[in-house]
Amino acid sequence: MVKRMPILGALAAPNWWHHHGTKMRVARLSLTRKTLKLVGSAASVWIRCIAPRTKAPWRIDWQIVHGVDSGVNGRIWVDTKSLQSAFGLSEESGTFGDGVIERSGADVAEQGEYVRYKDFLNIPCPGTGHDGDPNVSIRLDVDIKAAVMRLIG
């Protein structure tokens, strides 16, 4: 695999990442319900353990508001390894992440799930979030990483 540097913009963030990701914060963590909610000014992300005995027990739902009556949302299912890697708790890419890494200059990725360069995460793919791109950007901070670590257990 050929690793290349991403094109960096403001905040030394990759050009496929949206600056609203800096506004994402932990809003709610329930260890009994195995849920975590992250919110920002224009987006929200729910991580839930829906099917604990399956190969991909974690469901990630997100919503991005573009305007009064405009927005996008999405959903993916991931395994624990992908959840850890996406949120900076591991540096292990998924089985199908090499192509995304080569194209985007990411550190780790899994096709159709996440792409991350340092603490700049996009779910489920690279893209700016402009013009209805169906992805959400999150700047991973200490609180978000700790919340995901506690959620996983």
Image (cartoon, rainbow, N blue to C red):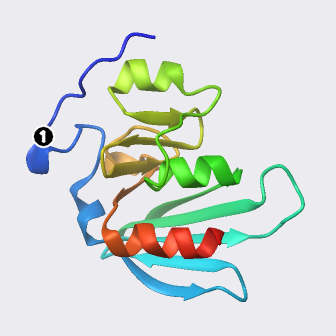
What residue is rendered at 31% in x and 52% in y? 119
Q: Observer-nearest residue: 67 or 145?
A: 145
User: Which element type, helix, strand or loop, lies under badge 1?
Assistant: loop
Q: Residue 111 location in percent, x, y?
A: 58, 32
What residue is rendered at 53% in x and 64% in y? 62
User: In this view of the protein, can residue 96 be seen by the observer?
Assistant: yes
Q: Residue 53 location in percent, x, y?
A: 90, 61
Q: Relative to residue 1, is residue 83 drawn left or right?
A: right
Q: In which quadrant of the rendered image does the C terminus lie?
A: bottom right
Q: Relative to residue 15, is residue 144 drawn left or right?
A: right
What residue is rendered at 45% in x and 63% in y? 71
Q: Residue 40 location in percent, x, y?
A: 34, 75
Residue type marked 1: Gly
Q: Residue 24 location in percent, x, y?
A: 34, 71
The residue at which mark 1 appears reads as 9
Specify the quadrant of the image occupied by residue 7.
top left
Q: Observer-nearest residue: 100 or 134?
A: 100
Hey, which residue is sitting farthest top in the picture? 2
Query: Callout 1 environment at 10 Å: few (<14), some (14 to 19), or many (20+)?
Result: few
Q: Relative to residue 120, is residue 72 drawn left or right?
A: right
